[in-house]
Amino acid sequence: MGNMVKDRLIHLPPQNLEAEESLLCALLLCNDEVSAVREVLEPEDFYSTAHREIFTAMLKLADEEKPIDLVTLTNCLKERNQLEKIGGAVYLARLIDTVPIAVNVLHYADIIKEKAGKRLFIDKANKLSKKAYDDTIELDILLTEDREMSLTIAKKMAKESEVQKIDISFEAIQSYFSTIVETPFNSINNVISGLAAGELVVIGGRPGIGKTAFALHFLRHTAIECDRPVIYFGAMMDEKKIHARLLAQQSRMSLRKEIMGGRQLEESQVKLLLQCQEQIRPAPIYDYIVNREISVSELQSNVLSIRDQIKQDIGLIIIENLQQIDWPARKFKNPWERADFVYPMLREFCSDIKTQTMVSSQLKKEVENREDKRPKLSDLFGGESAALSDTIFLLHRPDYYKKEEGGKREKCENAENNAEITIGKGAQPIILPFTFLGEPLLWEEIQ
């Protein structure tokens, strides 16, 4: 019989009724603590249904700016038809006998919050465990739901940040600035100085505008010039095509006409290509090509796996297309809704691994219906990108849209090469003039 009782106690949900009683008594004795406690706890965090109702009544009285004592609390519970359910006025009077030290009220709140978090974890873990027995549910979905469960619980358990005076050592500041890597373009460096560890950068543009070519500039700069590892997550191109485009950029030779066009190359051109190839081959470039959607958890596991294998911090992560990232546990109406949902998860991942991450994203098609087709921040897939991105590059080629429309081109010098990049984040966007060379797919700044 004793063992049966012991087993039942072991399986009781995590709770601490003494802490709940002590907290409620402390609030009765010191109403001033209610505002601090409500920033930590919600009524649902209490294990006891009676305590849940009492705390709800206390919050109601506080909102009405009424004192919280035995009389007002009894009347409030009676008006809400909850007095008898919590044990009547006798139970409220018994709470006073608990007599905690009022200064410990937030300590009690932390205990209650932790127990509530554990109960939530058990509930969600049990549901996930049942799903694991279902052969029709894929492992990737279970892993995604597991991550979403962890994020939900972590968000619930998060506390309001305390106001603290900024006190950062000079060494810490030096350490931060040491992580900043300049971009391949001087004009951009003059605006943002470079990219720091953990920053998330978005390259926005319509299909075919040159987002991949722009990203490859950063890849070459980081891997070849800075000798820092780069991981490239591709969706549209295989490894050979990526390396061919790198070779074209490095040599400044036409990708289609000369390198892949089967033309007889001059001896000087062959020599140049071989030199460029010798620069690219030893560079720490790691391709992860998937011609399908990829989940955030798969992306994360592959980055961590590569980092462990090479035993070196990653200098840059490039994700070819934000719309290729999926969250298998959820159904979305369209790729834009999905991208908006996964973006905060990507933001968190970048911060955790402290690696610069660059992701390209399509713009809304509405940009092509405007008379002024210069992209804006609002043309990105959703508001999350502007709020969570450290830097946003919006690519624009006026002549690109003239070709699309099939109309006559205006006469202007280097019309086909006319391009610009808008750097958007925070203050007024800054527009920098660039030249885009369709062959060999190069973005060049105009000094």
Image (cartoon, rainbow, N blue to C red):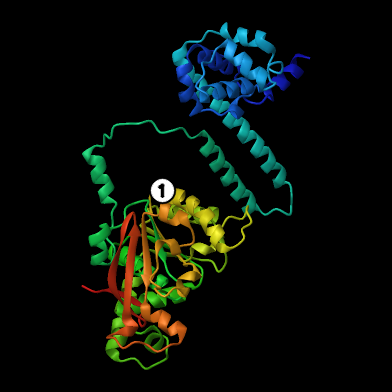
The x and y percentages for residue 139 are 65, 52
Which of the image's four quarters has the C terminus?
A: bottom left
Instruction: Write the residue at 64% across / 49% down.
Output: 142
Numbered marks: total:
1
Q: Using the rendered view, name the quadrant where residue 282 is placed.
A: bottom left
Task: Give the amino acid type for the residue marked by disc 1 in the picture.
Answer: Ser
Dot 1 lies on which element? Answer: helix
Q: Using the rendered view, name the quadrant where residue 439 is placed.
A: bottom left
Q: Nearer the viewer, residue 93 or 143?
A: 93
Q: Is residue 54 left or right of residue 224?
A: right
Q: Nearer the viewer, residue 173 or 204?
A: 204
Vertical side of 28 occupied by 425: above or below: below
Location of mark 1 (residue)? 351
Task: Evaluate whether residue 120 shows in this view.
Answer: yes
Instruction: Write the residue at 47% across / 10% down.
Output: 101
The x and y percentages for residue 371 are 42, 75
The x and y percentages for residue 285 are 39, 65
Q: Nearer the viewer, residue 353 or 26?
A: 26
Q: Classify 10 Å Cα crowding around label 1: few (below 14), some (14-19), many (20 and above).
A: some
Q: Is residue 275 left or right of residue 139?
A: left
Q: Using the rendered view, name the quadrant where residue 25 is placed.
A: top right
Instruction: Write the residue at 59% across / 50% down.
Output: 144
